[in-house]
Structure formats: C-alpha cells, structure tokens
Image (spheres, rainbow, N blue to C red):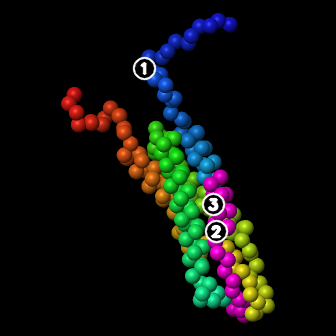
Amino acid sequence: MTDVAEPRRAGTKTRGRRPPMSPTRVCVEIGLASVVFGVLLGVVWYLLSPEITGQVTERGFSVPIDQARRLFDRVAVFALAGAAVGLVLGVVSGWRHRRRPVTSVLMLAAGGLAGSFVAWGLGAGLGSSSTAGEPGTAVTLPLELDAPAAVLAWPVVGVVVMTVMALFRDDRSPWVWNGGSR
C-alpha cells in the first residue's frame, strides 16, 4: 500500500461542501419519512378525534344532532394534523434538499399523499368498527374520514412550503443577474 493522494479532477471545488444527494436518495428519505409520519398521524388522529355515539335503527345508524357536529371535528383533526406534518416535512426537505428542489417537490406530493392514506387506514383500523346491534342500542360510530379531500392537506402544504422556500432562497446560479454591474 502506498500513501499516494488521488489526483483532483479539473473543475471540482472542495470548499467544505458535500456533493448533492442523488435523486434516488432524496426520494427514499422523503418516502420513508412520509410513511413514518403517516403512522404517527394515524395514531394522533385516533387519539384526538372525538367519539361519536348514536343509535342503531331499522335503517342503519342514527346520529343525534348534538353529536353530528363532531363528524366535522374528526375531519378537521385529520386535516390540521396533516397540514402540520406537511409544514414540518416541507421545511425540513426545503432545507435539507435545497439542491434538488424539483425532486423534493414531486416526492413531497407523492409521499404526502401516500402518508395521508397510511394515516387514514391506520386511524380507521384503530377505531371501533362495529355499528351492528338491536334497534335502539347505543353504539360508537367507527372512525371514518367523511371528507376524503382532507388527505390533500399534507401534500398541498408540503409542496407550497417547499416551493416558497425554493423561490426565496439565495440562488447564485450563473444565469441569475443580481442587479450589480459586471
């Protein structure tokens, strides 16, 4: 073995910067984070959503008027928690993967949608699932997402945050003129 230094390639700069991550690694990081946060969001949704009790009727299930407002509360908890996760992942991805903004934005959209579906399925699976019984029996309504558009809160907030961060960052690319004389 010899201690010969490897020659530098022409045009490479080593000012303490790491080379940008590959697009595959960016996708894997954001995808794994989305699945993990999806599981956490599902548990948080289950824990924070209000229980709704109603009665079994001959035609199905009946929710009293005073309990009906809580149907919205369930959707609101899911949407707001999803938006918070989108905000966090958007900021972290915008900072960590600032040199791959297109890959990050696309993966935030896809990963956010996948994470929302994971959270929806897990939260619904953790909730009660039985509304069967004799007419007049009081039962708890299963945890369901009555407004499926709420799954879009996470990906939309994540993409908007990442896009705004990409637009306002200090980009010193050669094609950007900074207003100074040359």
**55 vs 155: above or below:** below
At mark 3, the secondary structure is helix
Camera-side mark, 3 or 2: 2
Badge number at residue 11: 1
Give the magenta-colored segment's residue range: 36-59
The answer to whether residue 142 of the structure is visible from this angle is yes
In three-dimensional space, the C-alpha distance between marks 3 and 1, rounded to whole angstroms, equals 46 Å
Q: Is residue 41 rendered magenta in the image?
A: yes
| Amino acid type of the residue that numbered disc 3 sits on in the rendered structure | Leu
| Amino acid type of the residue that numbered disc 2 sits on in the rendered structure | Leu
Instruction: Give the labeled residue for mark 3.
Output: 41
Q: Residue at x 65, y 58 (%)?
A: 40
Please tell me how crowded label 2 is: few (under 14), some (14-19), or many (20+) other residues with Cα within 10 Å. Answer: few
The answer to whether residue 121 of the structure is visible from this angle is no
Q: Residue at x 20, y 30 (%)?
A: 181
Please tell me how crowded label 1 is: few (under 14), some (14-19), or many (20+) other residues with Cα within 10 Å. Answer: few
Quadrant of the rendering where the N terminus is positioned: top right
State the residue in front, 177 or 41. 41
In three-dimensional space, the C-alpha distance between marks 3 and 2, rounded to whole angstroms, equals 10 Å
